Amino acid sequence: MDSVNRQTEWPCSGCGACAAVCPHGAIVLKPDETGLLTARVCGEKCVGCGLCTRVCHRFSDEVAGCDLRESPLYAVQSANPETIKNCSSGGLAHELALWTVRGGGKAMGAVYDTRTDRVRHETVCTEAGIAALDGSKYLQSDPQEAFRNALAEAKKDPSARFTVFGTPCQIAGLAKACEVSKVRDRFLLVEIFCHGVPPVGLWDKQTERIRKKLKANRFDSLRFRYKKDGWHSYCIRADANGRTFYGTRERELFWQVYFENVLLGDACMTCSLRKEVSLADLRIGDYWGRRYQSRSDGVSAAFALTDAGRAAIEELLRSGAVIALDPGTPEEMLRAQNMAGYADAAAHREAMELLKSGAPVEKAVRAYRSREPAKQKLKRVVLMASAVLPSSFRVMIRKRI
Ligand SMILES: Cc1cc2nc3c(=O)[nH]c(=O)nc-3n(C[C@H](O)[C@H](O)[C@H](O)COP(=O)(O)OP(=O)(O)OC[C@H]3O[C@@H](n4cnc5c(N)ncnc54)[C@H](O)[C@@H]3O)c2cc1C
């Protein structure tokens, strides 16, 4: 076990733990001016019991967790090629969810709602329901209702078991909520490596463009990482009216801005829950880096942080649901992730202030890009120009510059 220092002045990440444990329904997550959810307390309903502060990482000086660098690392792929195709990396999340529901438990993860173009957590208990959880949705997911219901069910029914997928902030919050509710052993908590989530306006701008292209008001389906050009390509696929839209990382404003690391949520910019110390049972992610860079199907990495996490992976391996590849070392895997965080606080503040004052997202993007050093500008132009090249060249250029 290791520990990390917490700062009480951190912004709320909207993890939903406080709303889930409040016995008086006095806390709800509501969108701020940028559309990102943060916790709001209703003074009239609050009795000052303090339960919310016990589950909120912003109120702890220290949180005990396990260190990825000292935990067993696995590199795996689903044994089913169709599953790998439908998932963002190697399909491990799908196999964990399947194993859970086949064992009589429930799986909770993020689903994309094509009516609202927003993401929320949902709980499924059938094999057919798992498809909606598959795939990364690069938006903040609203977990409050699903978390609240799962905790209530676990408290009422001692046989209830859940596997929950979420971002590190959501999983850290839920882990604490489970502890105060004395149901932690009933939850397998699986967090994803997390780059952060962008303001909602950026996604609204992107969906406006896709809708125009498809001449549709609503999508029939939407995927953020469709593997048309392989695992490394980050391609949005939207279907509507019998037409299909593909949006690549090089061409779409959404992806460009997401990877420029300035217009992410306030809490994401300073988040340390996404770093090496974790309260989850498992941390899963894309096994980026040189080891699997020539593969186009997708490889999942998983750190087993607890005995329960390790047992789950070992069971999937034993049953043949997933196939083991060479895991390399934790240092190697982590080197290919952005564990350092995001430096450009001034540019972030200025861009977010603009959004909060009602400015369109393009204006906020122009504002922070105007501060970019010439080298960064050149890199962006080269990446955008590479959009006309075949995928393998685009990936190569991205890695070289
Ligand atoms: C916002 C975001 C940022 C990410 N950043 C990184 C990163 O920097 N490095 C890295 O290696 N991997 C990152 N990932 C994780 C990666 O995309 C894959 O999810 C992971 O490798 C597992 O792949 P998979 O094929 O097993 O499962 P997938 O098919 O990708 O399923 C992932 C699971 O996560 C849940 N999920 C999907 N979207 C969200 C969401 N918005 N909020 C909460 N839960 C969600 C799903 O319900 C599903 O159960 C990120 C994912 C998201 C959503």
Image (cartoon, helix red, strand yellow):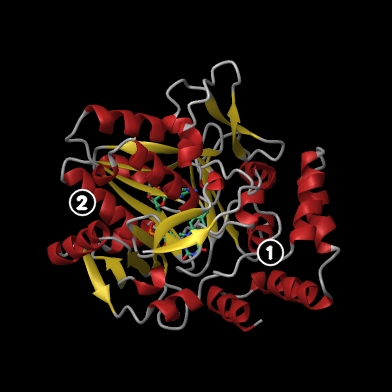
User: Residue type at mark 2?
Assistant: Trp
State the residue in front, 328 or 48: 48
Can residue 88 be seen from the camera position used here? no
Residue at image position (56%, 38%) is 117
Asked whether 23 or 302 is in front, the reply is 23
Left-right relation of 331 to 105? right
**Residue at 49% of width from left, 68% of height from top?**
229
> Percent position (x, y) of residue 220?
48, 39
Q: How many marks?
A: 2
Residue 184 picture location, percent across and down = 29, 44
> For the residue marked with disc 1, what is the amino acid?
Glu
Residue neighbourhood size for the residue with mark 2, other residues' Cα within 10 Å, grouped as few (<14), some (14–19), many (≥20): many
- Image quarter where the C terminus lies is bottom right
User: Residue 61: x percent and y percent?
Assistant: 53, 52
Say whether marks 2 and 1 touch (CB < 8 Å). no
Ligand 1 is found in the corner quadrant, namely bottom left
Q: Residue furthest top?
A: 44
Numbered disc 1: secondary structure: helix
**Pointer 1 local density, CA inside 10 Å: few below 14, some 14–19, many at least 20:** some
Please indicate, yes or no, whether residue 233 appears anywhere in the rendered image.
yes
Task: Kindly identify which residue carries mark 1.
Answer: 260
- Residue at 70% over, 54% down: 263
Residue behind mark 2: 99
Cα–Cα gap, marks 2 and 1: 37 Å
Callout 2: helix, strand or loop? helix
First in residue order: circle 2 vs circle 1: 2
Front position in the image: 21 or 37: 21
Q: Quadrant of the N terminus?
A: bottom left
